Amino acid sequence: MEAIISGQVFVVKDNIDTDQIIPAQFLNLVPTIHEEYEKLGSYALYGLPTELYPTRFIAPGQLDSQYSIIIGGRNFGCGSSREHAPIALGSANCHVVLAESFARIFFRNCVATGEVYPCECGERLCEVFKTGDHVTINLDQHTVKAEATGKVHAFKSLGDVRPVVDAGGIFNYARKTGMIAARK
Amino acid sequence: MDKVQGCGTLSFSLAWWLYMTLTEKILARASGKREVQAGDNVWVSADVLMTHDVCGPGTIGVFKREFGADAKVWDPKRVVIMPDHYIFTADSKSNRNVDILREFAKEQGLPYFYDVIDDPNGKWVFDAQKGPLKRQYGERYAGVCHAALPEKGHTRPGEVLFGTDSHTCMAGAFNEFSTGIGNTDAGFILGTGKLLLKVPATMHFRLEGKLAPGVMAKDVILHLIGEIGFDGATYRAMQFDGPGVASLSMDDRMTIANMAIEAGGKNGIFEFDGQTKATVDARCLLNGTKANYDPVERDGNETFYQELTIHLDQIEPTVACHPDPGQRKLAKSMGHIQLDRAYVGSCTGGKTSDFIAFARILRGKHVKIDTFGVPATPAIARDLQNTRWEDKTIWDILVEAGVRMTENPGCAACLGGPVDTFGRMNTPLKCISATNRNFPGRMGHKDSQVFLASPATVAASALTGHITDPRES
Ligand code: SF4
C-alpha cells in the first residue's frame, strides 16, 4: 500500500458499533465467498440511523463508496467481534478509518484482515472535518491534510501494526516474516 | 550490610515475579512462560476454539484459503462448533451456513459439532409452515454457544478459550481466560492452535455484601458499566473477586462475565470456588469431556490497573437506556418510558434462573405488551417445562401470563437477524430486554430502541407497559 492516501472523507460520531457498520441481517453473507464479499461492501455503514446521517456512505445501487476515508469519534467499532465489519468497509473501498479511539476487537480485526488502516488520532477530528471534505493522509508521517485549507493534523503512528496491514493481513505478514511456512 | 540488602532486593524481586493477576497467570501458563506482565505480546496456546454459524463459515474459508483445501485442524478435540445464531429462519443463506459447518465437521472428524439436525448427511431447512414456536431441532443441537459451552462440558478453570463471538468472555465465570476474536484469527488458530495476544492490564472489582431482593446479577453489571463507562475497560481484563462472589450463583457470574465486553473488556474472570468446581466437574463428567484442570488463584499482592469495590447490597434495579449499554438509569426513575415490547432470552438473560425470576413476577398475572421468551438452550427449555411451581410448570406459568415462549432456543432477536426471526423488531418499537446490547438497530429496525434490564425488571415492565422497578410488583 502507498503511504499517501487521498480522497473524500465520511464523518461519523462516537460509538459507531458493528451493528451500524454492518447490520446483523447481512451476516448470512460469508466474507470468503467472493460475491458475498462484494455484497457485504454494498451494505457498509447501512445501520447508521437515517436522521443522524442523511448522506449515505454507499450511494443507492452501488457496490463501493465514494469515500475512501472514514473519520470517527470515540470507541469506533464497539460491539460484536464480527470480522464482517472491517471487511465490509474494505470491500466498499475504504482504506483508512481515522478515529479518536477504537474498540479492541475491531482494531484487531482491521489488522488481522489487512482490510483498512485503523489510525488513532486522539483528537476530535470528527468535529473538524465534514463528510465530503477532501484530505490527504500520509501514513509515514502520520498526518492528515485538509485540501481546502491546507491545515495539517497529526495522528498516532500505527507502530508494529503498520507492516501487518501493509502486507495485507496477519497471514501474509506471518509468511513474509517466516512465522509460518510460505505457501507451497 | 550489603548482603542483607542484597537478600532483601532478591526476595522482593522474587515475590514480585510471582505476583500475577488471574488473567496473567493463565496467559503465562498458556504461553509456556514463568511470568508475564501487562503489555507483553505472547503466543498463547488455545485449549478450546469455539465458532458458530455466523462466523464459522468465514473462519473455515480463511483456514482453507491459507492452509490449503486438504489442511487438517490442529486438534479436532479442541474445536467446538455450535450453530445458534440464524437457525430458525427460512433465509436460505443462513440455512446453507449450517450445512457448511456440517461438511467441515464431517471432513475433519470433529467430535464436538452440535448440529441442528440428526442426519450427518442431511441439509438443514427451517420449516416456516410449522411456525416459530414448535420444536424444530434434533438431539445434538445445543443452543446459544456461551450458555451451551459450560453445559456441554467445554469450560474449565485455568484454561484458554477463544471464540468467534464477542461474548465468549462469559466463560470467565468459570475461572478461565476467554475472549472473542475475528474469523482471520480463528482461522489462524484452526491451523496452528496458537494466537499472538497482548497481555491486558487487570482492573480489579472486589464484590462485597449480598444482593437485595428484586435485584439481580444483571443489575450489578449494568451498574458497573455505568460506573466505568462502556469503553471503560477497553484493552483490559476485569477480575471479579471478594467475599460477595460466594453469594452469586454460577448463572449470576455468567451474566456478569458475559457483559465484560460491554465495558470494552478483553475478558472478565472470576475467582475459583466450590461452586465452580461442583458445576464444572458435573458437566464434564456428564458429557464425557476432559475433566482435569488446574484453576488459578489469587496471591493477594498483585498489581492492578485500577481497583473498585462494589457493594452488592447497595445496587438497585438498573436499566441501560437506548442507544448504548453505558446509559445507566435506575428503573424506578424511568416510569415515563412507555414500551411496546418485552423480551427475555439470550446468553445473558435466557438461563433457567432468569426465567424463574421472570415467572416469579408474572405468575397469575397477564402482560400488557407483546412479550417474548427464548430459552438459551434446549436443556433450559426442558428445565422450564419440567420444573413445577405448585401445580404448574414455569413454562405454563409464562404462557398463561401471555408470554410467547418458543421451544426453539437460539440467539433469536437478541441481534436482530433475518427479518423472519422470532421476536425481531421490524418497525421502530421500544423494547425492554434481558439481553446484553442496545446499540441502534441491535434487535432489528435501525430506528427501534432497546432498554437493557434484568429479567425481573423486564417482567415488571411487561405487566405495566412502562419501565417498572420489580420491587413495586
Ligand atoms: S444470544 Fe445474543 S449476545 Fe448471546 S451469542 Fe447470541 S447474539 Fe450474541
Image: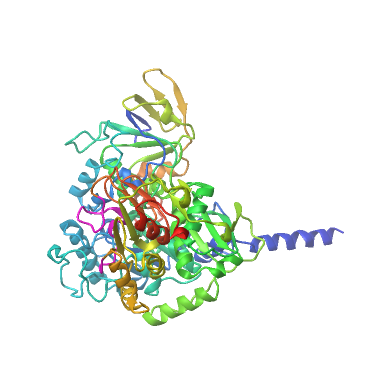
Q: In the rendered image, is residue A142 in sight?
A: yes
Q: Main secondary structure of the magenta part?
A: loop
Q: Nearer the viewer, residue B160 or A158?
A: B160
- Residue B229 on the magenta span: no
Magenta range is B406-425
Q: Exactly how many numbered labels are in the figure?
A: 0
Q: Furthest residue to the left?
A: B129
Q: Is residue B268 rendered to the left or right of residue A96?
A: right
Q: Kindly identify the residue that appears in the image at 18 percent across and 36 percent down.
A: A62
Residue placed farthest to the right in the image?
Answer: B1
In x, y percent, where is residue B2? Answer: 84, 58
Residue B78 at x, y = what percent?
37, 70
Identity of the residue drawn at 39% across and 26% down: A129
| Rendered image quadrant of residue B136 | bottom left
Residue furthest to the top in view is A149
Q: Does residue B261 sit above or below B347 in this rendering?
A: above
How far from the left and from the top, in percent, is residue B472? 46, 58
Q: Where does the N terminus of chain A fall, quadrant-wise?
A: top left
Colouring scheme applied when the structure was drawn = rainbow
Q: How far across and how far down the image is residue B399, in percent?
A: 28, 68
Verify whether residue B424 appears in magenta. yes
| Left-right relation of A122 to A90 | right
> From this viewpoint, is residue B266 visible?
no
Which quarter shows the C terminus of chain A? bottom left
Q: Quadrant of residue B146?
A: bottom left
**In the picture, residue A56 is in which quadrant?**
top left
Please name whichever residue, B189 or B284, is drawn nearer the observer in this view of the structure. B284
The quarter of the rendering in which ligand 1 is drawn is bottom left
